[in-house]
Image: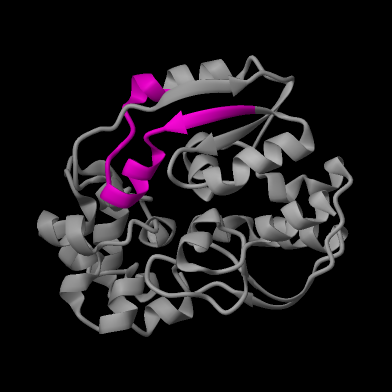
Amino acid sequence: MKLKTLSTVKITPKLLLNLIQLPFKKVEKPCIYCPGICISVCPTFINTGNLSLSPLGYSRYEDLGRNNCLKCWRCVSECPLSYPLPESYASEVKLTLEVLKKRETVLLSARNLDEKYSYGLSELLGTGLILINGLVERYDEGRPVNPSSLKRILRALKNYRKVYTISPESHHTLSVPLLIENLSGFSIRLNYNGPIHIPCLLLNREEKIIQALISIGVRPTKIIRDQCLKMEEPDGLSLCPRASMRNVKTIFDEILASLSY
């Protein structure tokens, strides 16, 4: 447990006992029984200091969660039980797949999330292109993925030798390898020296991502971890395609420029 969390939540023997027992209790929302171990990483709580605008409030009042939770999944990474609170606000969404261009190596694009970049990257890298529908609903509306549709997608992706994605959402849901961790395999070199923004969904990949970027010429001067694109514009080159919607430059702008040169 992080020191930052300990400063927010008072840990008592009774609390620890309750947390230990939670996996053995049949409860719909285990976070209701927790005093808020995750709130110190919740962007809306950090910004407002309002407990109602934190996982404590969102777990108890669905309307608050539906309308105010950023669905960034940071609370899930801190939760001892990894309870997926961000996908508890609405009904299931079914994922569907469209094969736009066949190749042995394909780039997986998430509709309404990364198309601005994925189409151009697929063309310049000579990869196939597959479009996934439904991910934006999961991460913007808090809709869990229909298990059967997820299995069909994963089964279909096994037909390709290599599949990469530029979308943190695709990586998070489907465990598809990130293109930014495999750029050296495409002989890409970048000349960037400055701050790098790591999106919420990729924080657990930070070390590997930074090592991969350094290997192709990127020189990070600062790593920005605590700014959520859904709330603010980070002062750095973002690794998330969503950043372009907020007029923030992304690493994919740099890649496209290097390939087009």
Image position, residue 67 (x, y; %) = 18, 60
Image position, residue 208 (x, y; %) = 72, 56
Q: Is residue 134 above or below residue 80?
A: above
Image position, residue 235 (x, y; %) = 57, 79
Image side of residue 224 versus residue 18, left or right? right
Question: Which range of residues does the magenta coloring cover?
Answer: 129-150
- Residue depicted at x 25% and y 64%: 55
Residue 221, image quadrant: bottom right
Q: Is residue 157 above or below residue 180?
A: above
| Residue 206 falls inside the magenta stretch | no
- Residue depicted at x 72% and y 35%: 123
> Is any atom of residue 165 visible in this view?
no
Image position, residue 173 (x, y; %) = 47, 39
Task: Give the colour scheme of this rendering.
Answer: one colour
Residue closer to the observer: 122 or 41: 122
Image side of residue 146 versus residue 197, left or right? left
| Residue 143 falls inside the magenta stretch | yes
Residue 24, image quadrant: top left
Q: Is residue 211 above or below residue 50?
A: above
Residue closer to the observer: 259 or 110: 259
Check the picture and name the quadrant holding the N terminus.
Answer: bottom left
